[in-house]
Amino acid sequence: MNGIHGVAIDRGKRMLDPSPAHVTHRDMIRIPSTLFSLTLALAVFSLVVAKSHGLEVYADGTITIGAEEGKVEGDGFAVTFPAPRWGMYNLMLELNCPELKVVKTLDGKLSVQGEEKALALAIAPGREASPAMSGIPRVYIAKDGACPVVLTLPGFADKIARLTFTPVREGTAQLGSDPSGVAELGAKEALLVGKRLCYEPNPKKLCLGYWINVDDYAVWPGVVLELPGIYEVTIYQGCAKGQEGSEAELVIEAGEAFEQRFPFTVIETGGFQQFVPVTLGTVEVPEIEPIGRISVEVRAKKIANSAVMDIQKVVLSKVSPDAPANGKEGQ
């Protein structure tokens, strides 16, 4: 960061990462049956949001775009909207086609900011007053600002009612500890909740940056710690001179099993990409079902100047069983 630069979803709270680890970038995106089930799960989220038209950008970073914002020409639907940040998204389509009674498969195309991919879509019919649905996983928006999107859907372009872009993790790695008990949670693997906080893919950065909105936060969901016990918690943070002093908090939790908080103050490191390890304390992780699955979350409490900090990674390292845990439980 230079100078100043963020399935079930509970808006304003936490998000569970809906992105499957096995899906990667390909010229052809095909949706297997398991992923099709995923799109239906995402549809449930879409239906619980109050019906609205036009363009909406929610606090969790979800973007919804009504069909009236775009234009249909032949088999294509085109729309341009202001993307608040770059990053990876799942795209859900809602379509008005009550005559559809069975799943319809079709080939199409998707272009986002000039990058075009072929699609093999499955459109699920709606029930009662619900719209038909189709999901496109892992759609990348490469830059913020004007984002032209063109969908080519033969026979269905004029049926599009709404597009919903839902943030997902940039990376696809399984999150967990190695055999020695070390879990390294890289910036690319974080699920980013908010409008500005984002992963910076520049090879000189490879970090979380643009943290200028206090409500944005990062979460590493479903981290598997196979060995219960005491873990040291370290965050690798960077902050330019004059930007230090923001208040933040790292939270480790496993549903209702346990929660531990580590409040800290961001220190100056000489630059936003000059990362230093800051040890926040230790946490005792009990035996958890399913096996050791926890979430790690970093939130800002107060921004002292223009930006909170950049984050390279969070590391949990298993330590001697004699070491005391010193985080703050349940606060």
Image: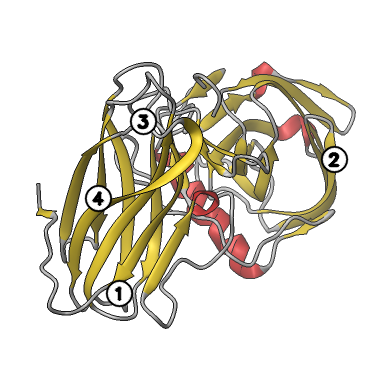
Specify few, some or many for label 4: CA neighbours under 10 Å numbering under 14, 14-19, or 20 or more.
many
Instruction: Name the kind of residue labelled 1 in the image.
Output: Gly
Q: Check contact, mark 2 vs mark 1: CB within 8 A.
A: no
Residue 158 as seen in the image, left or right of residue 303? right
Q: Secondary structure at mark 4?
A: strand
- Calculate the distance from the C-alpha at mark 2 to the C-alpha at mark 3: 42 Å
Q: Which mark is residue 251?
A: 4
Instruction: Name the kind of residue labelled 4 in the image.
Output: Val
Q: Which residue is mark 2?
A: 116
Q: Earlier in the sequence, mark 4 or mark 1?
A: 4
- Calculate the distance from the C-alpha at mark 4 to the C-alpha at mark 1: 16 Å
Q: Which residue is mark 3?
A: 268
Residue 53 showing in the rendered view: no
Q: Earlier in the sequence, mark 2 or mark 4?
A: 2
Query: Is 323 in front, or is 304?
Result: 323
Q: Earlier in the sequence, mark 3 or mark 4?
A: 4
Q: Which mark is residue 292?
A: 1
